[in-house]
Each structure stands twice: as structure tokens, then as C-alpha cells.
Image (cartoon, rainbow, N blue to C red):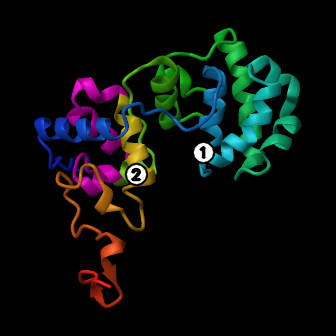
Amino acid sequence: MAKTVRSKFTRAKAEVLFAALAADRPDPRTELDFVNPFTLVVAVALSAQATDIGVNKATKKLFAVADTPEKMLVLGEEGVAAHIKTIGLWRNKAKNVIALSRKIIDDFGGEVPRTRDELTTLPGVGRKTANVVLNEAFGEPTIAVDTHIFRVSNRTGLAPGKTPDRVEAGLERITPPEFKKGAHHWLILHGRYVCKARTPECWQCAIRDLCAYKPKTPDPATVSKLGPRGPRRAT
């Protein structure tokens, strides 16, 4: 069994971190567009190896004609494919959308299931997708670890781990109950817009003083190729 990497945070320190993220983004939510639990399942499944912006462009017209599993089956695999050709892996994703629609009808009476075990029986739906659906559609305090959350959790020292499952388990342990429902959104949005993969924007980070990442990236406005900029001269 792999050794568990301990968080560099206490529960009290984690509470301060999440309070800061909550103050920075008071109303966090997914950036995927959806109109009901079914369209959320489809949107999240389509978002694998694709951007939310790209998925939203494709699903705008798709969901206008097929916002239920029954309508999606009528549209058919070729019909779905025609709407999502701008998304990576679109052929396989079109097959999965039709297959999961059929399974929702056959096994769950046309309603999106509300447990992780049931959700992950749907074609194209893994643990991460299931956790997103449980959190966003049904208000469950689940944490879906994507590349952004994986990076932020390791870089800050909040919940280090070598696999998404390890990071998820660490976040479950360290996140105070009152922040668990929003934790997924706060971490993913922080990773997407501030704690970026190549160059984290530490100079505008709300949790800079709590983060274990060193060295912090300086504000480019204060740095030139010759080093730190000096004070502006009066003109």
C-alpha cells in the first residue's frame, strides 16, 4: 500500500484557507452550462480533455434539441456527433452519451441516479464526473479531483498525494464540514485562474501567506529581464 503523505495544514489552518477562498469567490459554481441533472452528466462527461468553454459552445445547440435521455436517443449517435465535433474524442463521447442515455432510461426510469455507485455504472462516467454531479446537481458535499485541484492540493500542501484518489481522501480529511460543499469549486477555480500550472500568479493569490509553494512567483509589473524594477523617476 502506498504511503499516505500528510497534509502540511492543520484543520484550523485549512479553515483559514477555505475562508479566504470563499471571501474571494463567494458564489462558486461550475462553469459548464446545463439545465437539469441529465444535461450536467452529459456536459461533465464531454469535458474530459476539453475546456468548459469549448463544451459550452457545443452543448448550447445540443441541449436545445435534446435535454432528456429520451430526446438524446431520438437524436442518435450521429446526431450527437454532429453537435460535438469540435470537442476532443468526439466519436467515443457521442457513443457514450447515447449509451448512458439508454442506461438511464432502462435502469433508472429516465432519472439520473443519486448515488456515486449508480452514477459510475453509466458509460463515460467515472468517479470525478459522479462527484461533480452529486455536488452540483444534488447538493452533496463531494470533491471531484481534476488536474486543477490535484495541482493546488499538492502545491499548497493542503492535501498532497500522488494520485487523484489520494488527494480526494486527503481533502475529505482536512476540509472543515462547513466548507465541504464549496471546496470543489473554490479549488478548481483557484487553480484555473490563479494557481496556474505553468506560472502561478502568486502576487494576486488570496491564500499566498498560507501556501507552502516556494519560491512565490513575483508580480511581472515589478520585474524586468534585468531584475527587480526600481522606483519610477519623476518626470
Image coords of residue 134 (percent x, y): 48, 23
The earlier-in-sequence mark between 2 and 1 is 1
As displayed, is residue 86 above or below residue 133? Answer: below
Is 101 one of the magenta-colored residues? no
Front residue (pair 233, 175): 233
As displayed, is residue 104 above or below residue 214? Answer: above
Quadrant showing the C terminus: bottom left
**Which disc number belongs to residue 191?**
2
Give the amino acid type for the residue marked by disc 2 in the picture.
Gly
As displayed, is residue 148 above or below residue 235? Answer: above
Residue at 60 percent of width and 50 percent of height: 51
- Left/right placement of residue 183 relative to residue 38 reads left
Q: Disc 1 designates what residue?
A: 52
Q: Quadrant of residue 230?
A: bottom left
Q: Which residues are magenta?
A: 152-181
Give the amino acid type for the residue marked by disc 1 in the picture.
Asp
